[in-house]
Image (spheres, rainbow, N blue to C red):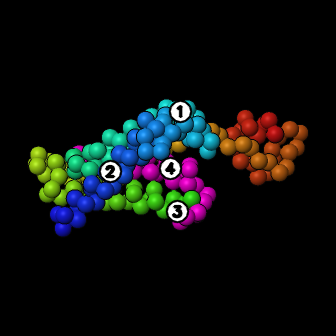
């Protein structure tokens, strides 16, 4: 059991470190902050470079912490928040399966890391070596809540408002089926 937990931590952590270095430094075939920032803008996120820095840092730092089994709930929250944002932006509307660009992969990563925030990293970890008891229901729920709140905050603050769609306009006002803010509806 210990070897299995270590394998999960090392593999998931290393994969996230690699993703983080792609976003931050352009390593391993990545595009760096500017390229990743442009990509994030392409699916409706504002301040792409800032978000590329945040996502890359979350993946790099979260991945390093997760691989080491150190401060596992914090590592899990950092990773899961980034995966939840990806599920609602880059992978949104593409179904579940990754072969169609869906959110299967990012949701699986989020579930694994949050699951280990509940269970803990196991005895072969820095948390165990330092006698940090950061596992159980409270720590798992805390990591899940932190990830969900962080992801929701990023989406609320940085996602561009959707364009207004109004099938019925009367005297310049949308009267049926509007999507968007009131200001957008008045412009219709």
| Lower position in the chain sequence, tag 4 or tag 1 | 1
| Lower position in the chain sequence, tag 1 or tag 2 | 2
Q: Is residue 136 visible?
A: no
Give the CA separation, mark 3 to mark 4: 12 Å
Local secondary structure at mark 1: helix
| Lower position in the chain sequence, tag 2 or tag 4 | 2
Say above or below: 5 vs 156: below
User: The C terminus lies in which quarter of the figure?
Assistant: top right
Q: Are marks 2 and 4 in contact (CB under 8 Å)?
A: no
Marker disc for residue 14: 2
- The residues colored magenta run 71-100
Marker disc for residue 34: 1
Residue at the image position 58 percent from the left and 55 percent from the top: 92
Give the CA separation, mark 4 to mark 1: 18 Å
Front residue (pair 69, 99):
99
| Mark 4 neighbour density, 10 Å: few (under 14) some (14–19) many (20 or more) | some
| Lower position in the chain sequence, tag 3 or tag 1 | 1
What residue does disc 3 label? 98
Q: Nearer the viewer, mark 4 or mark 1?
A: 1
Give the CA separation, mark 3 to mark 2: 20 Å
Marker disc for residue 86: 4
Q: Main secondary structure of the magenta part?
A: helix
Q: Are marks 1 and 2 in contact (CB under 8 Å)?
A: no
């Amino acid at each position: 059991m210990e070897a299995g937990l270590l394998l999960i931590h090392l593999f998931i952590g290393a994969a996230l470190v690699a993703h983080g270095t792609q976003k931050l430094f352009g390593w391993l075939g990545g595009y760096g902050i500017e390229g990743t920032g442009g990509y994030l803008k392409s699916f409706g996120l504002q301040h792409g470079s800032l978000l590329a820095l945040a996502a890359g840092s979350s993946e790099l730092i979260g991945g390093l912490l997760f691989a080491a089994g150190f401060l596992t709930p914090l590592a899990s929250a950092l990773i899961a928040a980034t995966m939840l944002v990806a599920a609602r932006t880059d992978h949104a509307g593409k179904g579940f399966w990754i072969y169609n660009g869906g959110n299967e992969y990012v949701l699986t990563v989020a579930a694994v890391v949050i699951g280990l925030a509940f269970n803990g990293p196991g005895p072969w970890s820095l948390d165990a070596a330092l006698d940090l008891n950061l596992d159980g229901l409270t720590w798992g729920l805390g990591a899940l809540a932190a990830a969900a709140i962080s992801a929701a905050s990023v989406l609320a603050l940085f996602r561009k408002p959707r364009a207004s769609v109004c099938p019925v306009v009367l005297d310049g006002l949308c009267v049926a089926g509007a999507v968007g803010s009131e200001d957008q509806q008045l412009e219709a």
